[in-house]
Amino acid sequence: MQPVGHHIAEFNIGTLAHDWDDPRVADFVNNLDRVNAVAARSPGFVWRMTDDDMDAAQKDTGGVLGGNPRTASTLSVWEDVESLEHFVWNTVHKRFYDRRGEWYDEAENTGPRLVMWWLAEGERPTIGDAKARLDHLAAHGDSDYAFGWAHLRAARAAGQGDAA
């Protein structure tokens, strides 16, 4: 159940199968602005780390993301699960999500690639926060500290909230 006075933060990360300027990932790259614009206009959208800040975090060889030049990630905050769900599954985002196998390197993308957590309203997560939550999810599985879609579905099934 979503705690009162909290939003939901989400971080997703993956490694592209090819460099950003490779024609095999061009459809993905060429539509990032479109998908991000839909997110920003979506009901319930609160915040997304800017492209420049995300790019810097991804390329930082001493940073928590490791500096792989083919990293693709997003860090955003939404008012509630329903708003995030609507964007993920009921907008143009879904068409690109369904094609992720064309663009991401499955050998490089082991473990969880998405983590969510509750964040006090008005707070903004950092890349360090996001990576720590992802690592916690990978090491311990779903918990109230870090979780994926299955944890939210289980809460709904148990009558503990209306997240899906």
Image (spheres, rainbow, N blue to C red):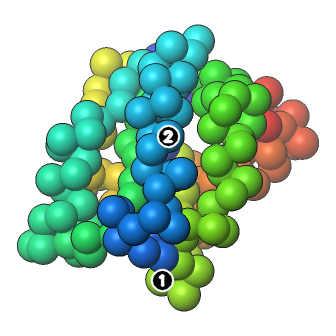
- The residue positioned 64% from the left and 22% from the top of the image is 83
Horizontal and vertical percent for residue 115?
52, 54
Q: Which residue is mark 1?
A: 108
- Quadrant hosting residue 15: bottom left
Looking at numbered disc 2 in the image, what kind of residue is underneath it?
A: Asn
Do residues under tags 2 and 1 come within 8 Å of each other at their CB atoms? Answer: no
Label 2: how many Cα within 10 Å (few below 14, some 14–19, many 20+):
some
Quarter location, residue 60: bottom left
Q: If you read the primary sequence from the N terminus, does the residue marked by circle 2 or circle 1 appear first?
A: 2
Residue drawn 26% across the image and 70% down it: 69
Which quarter of the figure is the N terminus placed in? top right
Q: State left or right for residue 133 relative to residue 106.
A: left
- Please tell me whether mark 2 sits on a helix, a strand or a loop: loop
For residue 25, say whether it is visible.
Answer: yes
Q: Any mark on residue 31, and which?
A: 2
Residue at x 12%, y 73% (from the top left corner): 61
What percent of the width, then of the height, locates residue 160?
79, 34
Residue 27 in the image: state x and y as whole percent: 53, 51
Q: Where 3 falls versus 133 (above or below)?
A: above
**Nearer mark to the viewer, of 2 and 1:** 2
Q: For mark 1, does the 10 Å Cα neighbourhood hold few (<14), some (14 to 19), or many (20 or more) residues?
A: few
**From the viewer's perspective, is residue 164 above or below residue 131?**
above
Q: Where the C terminus falls, by quadrant?
A: top right
